[in-house]
Image: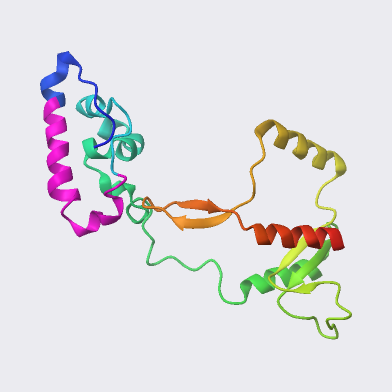
Amino acid sequence: MGEPQIIDVTMQDKIFQKIADARYYMNNVVNMEQSYEQVRDICKNQHESCAFWAVLGECENNPNYMKAKCAPMCQSCDFLSIETRCPLDPEAVDALYPGDVTKIFERIQTDPSIQQYEPKIVSRPNYLPGDTEETADYIIGPWMVVFENAMSDEEADRLIELGGIEGYERSADVGKKLADGTYDKKVWWIHMLVMLLICLLD
C-alpha cells in the first residue's frame, strides 16, 4: 500500500486496526470494483505517517492532503480520479462555440485599442481577400499573432531577469493522460523548429 508505516507504540492498537481496515478496503473494494480500475496503481500511502495521521482524524481535518497522499488509510482512492475531484457540470455553458476563435483573432486585426501593441499576423487559416501565396506576408496554418510592442524594453528586461532567477522551462504541450487525470508534458520539436525558422525569415 505504499510507504511502510511508522507505528507509535502509544497508539499501536489503533494504528494496526487502521492498517487492517485499509488492507480490507484495498483488497475488497479497490481491487474488485471496476470503477477503481484507473486508480489502482496509484492508490498508495505516500508518507510513512499516513496511518498515524488517519488515527488522529486527519482524513477529516485535512482532507485535501490526506485523501490524495494517504488514500488507502483514508479509503479515498476514488479521490485520485479527476472525474471525482472535478466532475463536469452537465448544465455548464460552453465558453467557446465554433468560429469564436477566428472572431477573436479577426478582432485583434481591427480593434483600435489593440493596435497600439502592433499585432502582426504570422499565420492564419486562410488568405485575406485579395491576398495570394505570392503577396501575403503570412503563412497558411493555425492562427499565430506576434505583438511587436506588447511591452516596453524595460518590462522585457525585467521579465528576462525574473526568468533567470526562477529558472526557465522548455515550452511543452499536453502529453499522455495519467491515471489521476493530470497530463504529462510533451515537447514538440518540430513546432520549435518552425518557430525558429519563422523568426529567422522575419
The residue positioned 16% from the left and 13% from the top of the image is 10
Figure disc tally: 0
The residue positioned 75% from the left and 39% from the top of the image is 159
Where residue 73 appears, as percent x and y from the top left, is: 22, 35
Classify 114 as above or below 6. below
Q: Is residue 194 visible?
A: yes
Specify the quadrant of the image occupied by residue 112: bottom right
Hey, which residue is sitting farthest top in the picture? 10
- Residue 21 part of the magenta segment: yes
* In this picture, residue 60 sits left or right of residue 110: left
Classify 121 as above or below 148. below
Q: Which is the main secondary structure of the residues drawn in magenta?
A: helix
* In this picture, residue 96 sits left or right of residue 141: left
**Residue segment shown in magenta:** 16-42
Where residue 134 appears, as percent x and y from the top left, is: 88, 81
The residue positioned 81% from the left and 40% from the top of the image is 155
Specify the quadrant of the image occupied by residue 131: bottom right
Where residue 186 appears, as percent x and y from the top left, is: 55, 54
Where residue 115 appears, as percent x and y from the top left, is: 84, 62
- In terms of depth relative to the viewer, which is nearer, 37 or 89? 37
Q: Is residue 118 visible?
A: no
- Residue 103 part of the magenta segment: no
- In terms of depth relative to the viewer, which is nearer, 194 or 129? 194
